[in-house]
């Protein structure tokens, strides 16, 4: 069994990880991208896995992991049931999630001089 503080500690031990807030609950980011979060009830967390990683975690630890609801789950977001969690398995899942976001190319930076900002006001069609 893990607590919300245990989950938080696992996430924040990773290089460059920071805690923020998103949609009313804590999240954990690396390079500005969310790799894990804690739900407001502090009984579950979420990790950003690939769909293949998610299937393997659920197959190996069906009491600990379940897909997130809807399209999020189809993309690999995986719910961690903290009351059923084993630290080693959750540590592995959090590490995979962190690796997934840190290996992504950086998003392009937009500046005020970029084309998205340099267009004049849009004219309405009559």
Image (cartoon, rainbow, N blue to C red):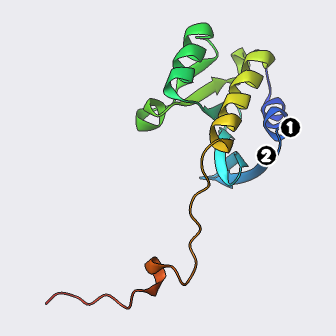
The residue at which mark 2 appears reads as: 17
**Residue 40 in sight from this viewpoint:** no
Dot 1: within a 10 Å radius of its alpha carbon, few (fewer than 14), some, or many (20 or more) residues?
Answer: few
Question: To which quarter of the image does residue 60 belong?
Answer: top right
Question: To which quarter of the image does residue 32 belong?
Answer: bottom right
Dot 2: within a 10 Å radius of its alpha carbon, few (fewer than 14), some, or many (20 or more) residues?
Answer: some
Q: Nearer the viewer, residue 29 or 112?
A: 112
Q: How far across and down, in percent of the image, does residue 111 sit?
A: 58, 78
Q: Could you tell me how many numbered marks the image carries? A: 2
Q: Is residue 28 above or below residue 100?
A: below
Q: Nearer the viewer, residue 12 or 79?
A: 12
Label ID, residue 13: 1
Q: Mark 2 and mark 1 in contact? Answer it, CB < 8 Å.
A: yes
In the structure shown, which secondary structural element does the residue marked by tag 2 occupy? Answer: loop
In the rendered structure, the answer to whether residue 65 lies left or right of residue 42 reads left
In the structure shown, which secondary structural element does the residue marked by tag 1 occupy? Answer: loop
Q: How far across and down, in percent of the image, does residue 87 sit?
A: 80, 19
Question: To which quarter of the image does residue 93 belong?
Answer: top right
Q: Give the quarter of the figure containing the C terminus.
A: bottom left
Q: Is residue 43 above or below residue 35?
A: above
Q: CA distance from mark 2 to mark 1?
A: 7 Å
Residue found 63% across the figure and 33% down from its top: 47
Q: Is residue 63 above or below residue 6?
A: above
Residue found 55% across the figure and 9% down from its top: 59
């Amino acid at each position: 069994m893990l607590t919300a503080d245990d989950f938080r500690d696992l996430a924040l031990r990773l290089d460059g990880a920071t805690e923020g807030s998103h949609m009313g609950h804590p999240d954990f980011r690396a390079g500005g991208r969310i790799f894990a979060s804690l739900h407001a009830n502090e009984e579950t967390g979420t990790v950003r896995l690939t769909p293949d990683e998610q299937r393997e975690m659920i197959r190996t630890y069906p009491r600990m992991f379940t897909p997130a609801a809807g399209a999020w789950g189809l993309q690999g977001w995986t719910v961690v049931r903290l009351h059923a969690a084993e630290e080693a398995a959750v540590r592995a899942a959090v590490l995979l999630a962190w690796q997934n976001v840190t290996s992504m190319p950086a998003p392009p930076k937009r500046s005020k001089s970029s084309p998205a900002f340099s267009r004049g006001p849009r004219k309405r069609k009559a």
